[in-house]
């Protein structure tokens, strides 16, 4: 039986991971956080002392980085780097700062492409990222572009960092988010953009519950 795939793209801080995870739980689909995969590569490069902006060095180091996705009894996605669980480490601000540069390299994106597609071939998935509907799963059954205003996204990220115990001032969070937006939309390899057949979902004025309800409604309409 053919598997069903839901592609959710959008800018940093749009709530993709939280909403996609919740939607996958409601639908009993596998949730795939592709951003975590790139963060794991960034984590590995940092450990090796590789400059994340050096495309050639990053490409040369890929062969020594074994990235695997595991799903625990809690159903949550865990990332392993060379056999070590780095799920917590990849969320540190210093790793996040490297992830954007790393994900811009064509060699890195090509290296991880088949891993992402293989998951969609085996399972019903809700997969989120920045090029899922345009590159990774161009034939996805459902494509949604999730966004919100930069100020709202920065406020959400600010609160998230506080809850994790790694607070940053709001102005810094907003500045970094705007820079990430620019980098993601202007990179040469798979830039962030809304797929032509994707539905736009702007959650600027919506609560989490309202956003999730609208996301599920859009998915169920399609499938």
Image (spheres, rainbow, N blue to C red):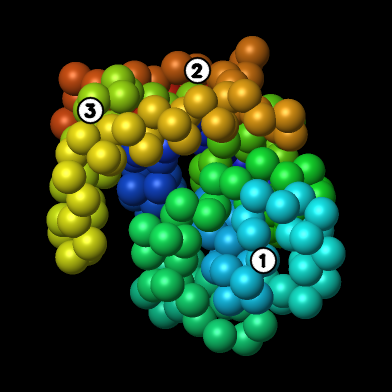
The reply to whether callout 1 and callout 3 are in contact (CB within 8 Å) is no
Look at discs 1 and 2 and give the one toward the viewer: 1
The reply to whether callout 1 and callout 2 are in contact (CB within 8 Å) is no
Look at discs 2 and 3 and give the one toward the viewer: 3
Query: Residue 223, position in %: x, y?
Result: 55, 31
Q: Disc 1 marks which residue?
A: 50
Query: Residue 64, position in %: x, y?
Result: 77, 77
Circle 1 residues within 10 Å: few <14, some 14–19, many ≥20 = some
User: Which numbered disc, 2 or 3, marks the residue that appears first in the sequence?
Assistant: 3
Query: Residue 52, position in %: x, y?
Result: 63, 56
The answer to which quarter of the image holds residue 155 is top left
Identify the residue at horizontal 26%, vertical 40% (top origin): 172
Q: Disc 3 marks which residue?
A: 152
Identify the residue at horizontal 77%, vertical 66% (top origin): 62
Q: Is 111 drawn above or below residue 86 in the view shown?
A: above
Mark 1 and mark 2: span between their CA atoms?
Answer: 38 Å
Q: Disc 2 marks which residue?
A: 199
Helix, strand or loop for disc 3: helix
Residue 144 in sight in this render: no
Identify the residue at horizontal 51%, vertical 26% (top origin): 182
The reply to whether callout 2 and callout 3 are in contact (CB within 8 Å) is no
Q: Is 98 drawn above or below residue 182 in the view shown?
A: below
User: Which numbered disc, 1 or 2, marks the residue that appears first in the sequence?
Assistant: 1
Is 97 in front, or is 159? 97
Helix, strand or loop for disc 1: loop
Q: Is 120 drawn above or below residue 61 in the view shown?
A: above
Residue 96 in sight in this render: yes
Query: Residue 44, position in %: x, y?
Result: 61, 71
């Amino acid at each position: 039986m053919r598997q069903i795939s839901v592609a959710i793209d959008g800018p940093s801080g749009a709530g993709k991971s939280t909403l996609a995870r919740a939607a996958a739980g409601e639908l009993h689909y596998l949730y795939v956080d592709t951003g975590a995969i790139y963060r794991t590569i960034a984590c590995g490069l940092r450990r090796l002392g590789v400059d994340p902006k050096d495309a050639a060095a990053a490409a040369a180091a890929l062969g020594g980085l074994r990235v695997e996705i595991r799903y625990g009894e809690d159903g949550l996605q865990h990332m392993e780097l060379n056999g070590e669980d780095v799920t917590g480490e990849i969320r540190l601000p210093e790793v996040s700062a490297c992830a954007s540069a790393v994900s811009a390299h064509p060699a890195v994106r090509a290296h991880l492409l088949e891993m992402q597609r293989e998951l969609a071939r085996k399972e019903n998935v809700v997969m989120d990222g920045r090029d899922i509907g345009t590159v990774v799963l161009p034939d996805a059954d459902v494509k949604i572009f999730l966004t919100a205003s930069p100020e709202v996204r920065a406020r959400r990220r600010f609160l998230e960092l506080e809850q994790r115990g790694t607070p940053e001032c709001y102005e810094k969070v907003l500045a970094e988010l705007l820079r990430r937006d620019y980098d993601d939309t202007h990179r040469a390899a798979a830039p962030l953009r809304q797929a032509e057949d994707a539905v736009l979902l702007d959650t600027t004025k919506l609560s989490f519950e309202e956003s999730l309800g609208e996301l599920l409604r859009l998915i169920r309409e399609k499938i």
